[in-house]
Amino acid sequence: MTVADLQDKSLANLDIKPHPTIAEWDEKAERIETPLSKGRIVWRKWGSGPPLVFFHGGSGSWTHWIRNIPDLSREYTVYAVDLPGMGDSDPFSDDDLKLLAGETNDFRDPLDPSWQPPPIAMAALSRILAGALETMIPTEAINLVGFSFGGMTAANVTARIPQRIRRLVLSGAAGLVQRDPTMKPLATWRFAATEAELAKVQRQNVGILMLHDPKSIDDLAVNVQMRNGLRTLSRKPPRHFTTLASLERAKPSLAAIWGRFDAISGWQVDQIRETFLQLDPGCQFHVVENGGHWVAYERADEFNRVLKTMLRHD
C-alpha cells in the first residue's frame, strides 16, 4: 500500500458540511457551467452591474471570496470560478491538456506520469479560461481580481484577452518573488481520520499560510480550508514565474491589495509595489498593514472598500 493509498483511505469517509454562510451564498448563486473535454468548469454569479470576476487561490474554490461577494454583488455582477480540478469543477483531461503551436510548458521539473490527475500547464489553463470569459461576458469590459495562484492565472488570462480586461487587481499573487524563507512548513492533513483531527490540522495551516492575526482564525475560515483541501484534484507542481511576463505583454490597468504580513510574499511587498509601478505608473497599490496572505478574508471590510475605490478609478 502506498502513501497515497493511506491518504485516500484516511479521508474517504469524511464529509465536511459547508458552513451556513457558504450554504447561504451557494443557494443564492446562479450556477454557470462552461465545457471541458470531459466535464465542466463551474462558475457562480450574483448581483447586477458591471462584471467583476474573482479567481481564487491554489487548492481553493469560490469560497475564498465568501466575505467579499455579499458586499461587492450590491454594485457589480460578481462571477466566482472554481478553477479546474478544484471545488466543483472537473480536472483537465485529453485535449484540455494539449498545448497549441507557440505555447510553452511552464513546469520547472519533469513530471511523474503516474501522478493523477495530471497538472495543468498555465498556457492551456489561461487559454480555456479566457475563452470561457468571452463566452459568458461577450461584450462588456471585465474587472478581474486574482488571489495567490489565481493572481498568476489572472495575469496570464489578461495577456490572452488584454482588450477585454478593464482593470486587473492582484492580491498576494503568485509568480512574483520567491517564498519567504522563514515561513513555517504546513502541517500534513491527509492522514486525518476524523473531522476533528482535520479541523485541528487545518486550523494550524490557516494560521501558518493564510491569516496573520490568530483572532481572525474563525470556524468559517477553517471550514473553507478543510473543504477546499478535500475537494482539490489538480496538483500544483513547481512552475516557472509567468506573472510578470504576462503583465509586461498585456500592459493592463493594474492595481493591487497586499497584506503586509503575507506569509509568502509580504517580505518583498515594497519591491513588488515598485515593480508594479514600473509596469503601470498609475497602479494603485494598497498595503493592508495588519493583514496576511488571505487579506480579502482577514480584513474584508478594508479589502472591499479599497477594491471598490480601485474599480471606480478610470
Image (cartoon, rainbow, N blue to C red):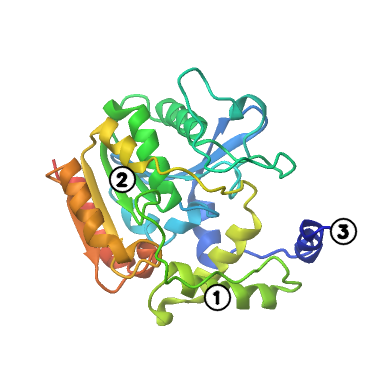
Image point (28%, 39%), residue name: 50
Foreground mark, 1 or 3, reads 3
The label shown at residue 159 is none
Q: Quadrant of the C terminus?
A: top left
Foreground mark, 2 or 3, reads 3
Viewer can see residue 4? yes
Q: Which residue is mark 3?
A: 1
Image point (57%, 38%), residue name: 120
On screen, residue 117 above or below 208: above
Of the image marks 2 and 3, the number of the one nearer the N terminus: 3
Mark 2, residues whose alpha carbon is within 10 Å: few (<14), some, or many (≥20)? some
Q: Which residue is mark 2?
A: 76
Q: Quadrant of the N terminus?
A: bottom right
Under tag 1, what secondary structure? helix
Tag 3: amino acid: Met
The label shown at residue 203 is 1
